[in-house]
Image (cartoon, rainbow, N blue to C red):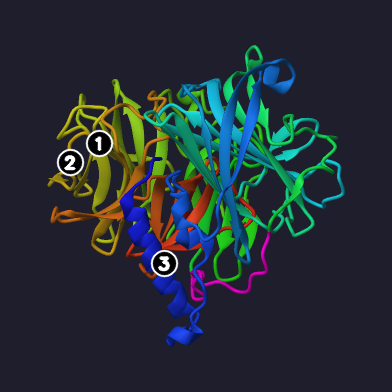
Amino acid sequence: MEADPLLRRFSRRIAVAALLLHGCTNPSDQLPEALSSKYPIDGDFDFADFAVAPTTANLPLVDMLGTGTTVGSTTVRWVALNDDRDLYLALEWTDTTHDSAFDAVLGPTDFDGIQVAFDDDGDGLVEVGEDARTVLAATVGSQYVDQHFESGDQTDLVGDGRAKLTYDAVGMKYRAEFLIPLGDDVTNEDGPINASSRFTFAVLDHVQLAGPTGNAAGLDGVLPALGADSSGWARVPLQPAGPHARPQLPSDLGGLIAFVSRHESENGDIFTFDPSTEVVTRVTNDPTTYKDNVSLSHDRTRIAFHSASSVAATNEYEIWTIDVDGSNLTRLTNNTNVDGHPAWSPDDTRIAYASRRNGTFHVVVMDTAGIELADLTSDGDDMNDPDWTEDGRIVFKTDLFSTIPQVRIAVMDDDGTNVVQLTTPLGVSDHDPVAAGGDVYFERFTKSTNYATDVESGFVPWNLVAAADDGGGETTLLADGYLNWLPVLDPSRTYVAHLKTFGYTEVRLLDLDGNDLGRLIPGFTRVAYLDWK
């Protein structure tokens, strides 16, 4: 999840596309560029590029998380800008060490960072539901948390905004960028921010929550907390702002999207989203069972998925189907194998899925009653994440051409013959291929390690790539330094929906040139899987 120059190129494309969408063909009619397009939020900026000079403060670092004695100081510089929708903050502060320890289970264990807090209504008191945003140093990257105040800082159920920080080891300083929506979110857990709102921030240094120990340097003396007196905080320096140029979601989207969201429970539930009406419909309502890897039938009447009592109960993973109205829940597999990742054939008469057998994953095909028709994988080979091409072949990831954890994308006939390698780059692994219009789209983990056990996997780039399904080569669709995954195409093969992680996960829409058109499913984050037919 680090900075990438491609994002700046895509940002310029977005600005041009936005102007065209707004009908701005005459330079005198052009709207100003939105902050979301102008600043990529990669933790890399230069104060000289801003039209306003930074504010500077020298703040004491206080131990016991800001309640003890002074142990040092930090110099902070910051700039605040806004457009009609967002507040942009760029901050820089000094720190002689880069504390960024992260545990895959426990999360941040020894970290630096910065928290920005808001008294949204500006009444001089921090109250339940008011806004806080935090970004922490984490291994090679950073972790952003969208928060609100409620008996201590709480993570919002539905995330928004974004932030990143970077550390300059030579200059011994951090830089952080925030893009914060001015409007409230759908759960009323933060915002709205206006000219009456107040804000402050606190630098975090060498914090270890297990203690808890660590230092804090607050702009207003202390770490913000629920019930704090915020009457001395500065007003948010908002400037009047009219409409800005930004991309718009297309008005002609069709089909149906099935997705899993864990925003209500860790096990997740299945929903559908009609992009033409923006109506979300709940399909399941069962917090007691884990659900993942949804696949929508081509006639848009049934959803296949795998389920178990919990994500850890892999020996229970079985394939199920359910009608989109929530009826006819049917179990298709029943064995001791790990069965998952189902995919409907083009005529909806068969389902391909991954099944762990004799130590490796096999691609297996069954009919819609659960009767196995063929195991397409030889023992000792690993073939996973199957999907069907429009002409009835099967794409998958595999170790046939590499050594796990590096896996490549390949395609074969539906009887397991005529295997063709589609991706070749070394030092990466490719996952979750979907086929559409002669191409295969997938996400690429940009390290050679096992992403499931590498603590850096959530902080390095995951790119979206398209490869010709005849082995004719590949093109990078999106490489913006963030974690991008699970691309699926709309029925017209004009747009790509995918999951994007800012510290929360939402569904974004791209055009086929990689231009980001916006958030596709409003009101839902922690999305875990999706399909579009």
Sequence-first tag of 3 and 1: 3
Tag 1: residue type? Val
Residue depicted at x 39% and y 23%: 453
Q: Is residue 38 left or right of residue 429?
A: right
**Residue 259: x and y, percent?**
53, 50
Q: Where is the C terminus found, in terms of image quarters?
A: bottom left
Circle 2 residue = 425
Q: Residues within 10 Å of mark 3 (few under 14, many from 20)?
A: many
Is 249 above or below relative to 445? Answer: below
Residues tagged 2 and 3 counted as in contact (Cβ below 8 A): no
Is 188 above or below relative to 370? Answer: below
Magenta-highlighted residues: 238-253
Residue depicted at x 56% and y 53%: 323
**Residue 345: x and y, percent?**
34, 54
Circle 3 residue = 14
Using the numbered discs, state the Cα–Cα distance from disc 2 to disc 3 in whole angstroms: 28 Å
Badge 2 element = loop
Sequence-first tag of 2 and 3: 3
Badge 1 element = loop
Residue depicted at x 36% and y 42%: 462
Instruction: Name the front one of labels 3 and 1.
Output: 3
- The front one of 124 and 137 is 124
Residues tagged 1 and 2 counted as in contact (Cβ below 8 A): yes
